[in-house]
Amino acid sequence: MITPSAAFVEVVANMRRILAEEAAATGDADLALFLRPLEHLTKEANASFSPDKGAKLPVCRYLAGALDAAPSGKARELASGLRRLEPFLNFVQNPNYRRAPPTGSFLTDYGYAVLAGPDDGAPALVSAPSIAFGILLLGPHTEYPAHHHPAAELYVPLGPADWAKGSATRSEARSADASAADWVRREPGCVIHHRPNVVHATRTHETPLAALYLWAGDLATYARLAD
Ligand SMILES: [Fe+2]
């Protein structure tokens, strides 16, 4: 019997291993920003979680399929831990998008749940003052349009999807044609790094997407769609 807290620690440990391998392979020193706080989270072996009893967002119907899409190796190991955490996850939505959805169907096909984050943010399984760690969920045939935020961000997708990365400042973003960004198919288990305020976007095809994310830096400012 694996407890939820053991599954949480397993997911954190697998994430740390993926980032450490990426840091060693690429020499990207910025990854240390994320690795140090994750180290603290591996000590949460006796944390207690309560099953989420609230109304589920529509996008939750895609969670099992998105986790099943993890093919093998690192992505599959992450998905295995997340499957055991599923009853405890509280999926929410960015209030900026709830106020002004980018498309008519976006809010039925988008949500995220926080595994670890600050106490004054969205409900988290584990309190973490200096990092936000969670799971983004998108339905099939969904585009999460160009957006930006001041936090530095890493994604590890569990399934295949297209990703785009644009310019590094808001003023540059305004002059860039975000809709014409170059989409790149990224494979499950890879590390995608968005520096602060970089405009980025994600789109799915037939398969729903679950992607683990990490935020460091300004954790209090929600993402906004690019102008
Ligand atoms: Fe982001």
Image (cartoon, helix red, strand yellow):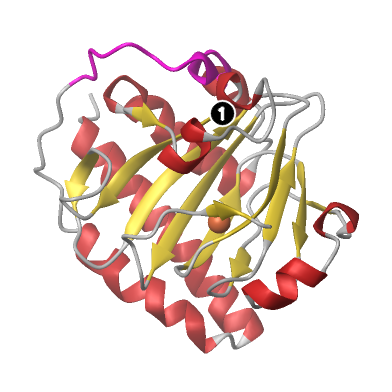
* Rendering coords of residue 209 (x, y %): 64, 34
Q: Quadrant of the N terminus?
A: top left
Depth order, front residue of 208/58: 58
Depth order, front residue of 24/196: 196
- Report helix, strand or loop for mark 1: helix
Q: Quadrant of ligand 1?
A: bottom right
Question: Hey, which quadrant is residue 182 in on the image?
Answer: bottom right
Q: Quadrant of the C terminus?
A: bottom right
* Rendering coords of residue 37 (x, y %): 28, 69
Number of numbered discs: 1
Residue at 78 percent across and 26 percent down: it is 141
Q: Is residue 56 magenta?
A: yes
Q: From the viewer's perspective, tell me whether residue 12 is left or right of residue 47.
A: right
Residue at 67 percent across and 27 percent down: it is 208
* Rendering coords of residue 160 (x, y %): 75, 41
Q: Which residues are magenta?
A: 51-62
Residue at 48 percent across and 78 percent down: it is 31
* Rendering coords of residue 102 (x, y %): 66, 36
Q: Is residue 77 magenta?
A: no
Q: Amino acid at mark 1?
A: Leu
Q: Is residue 196 above or below residue 134?
A: below
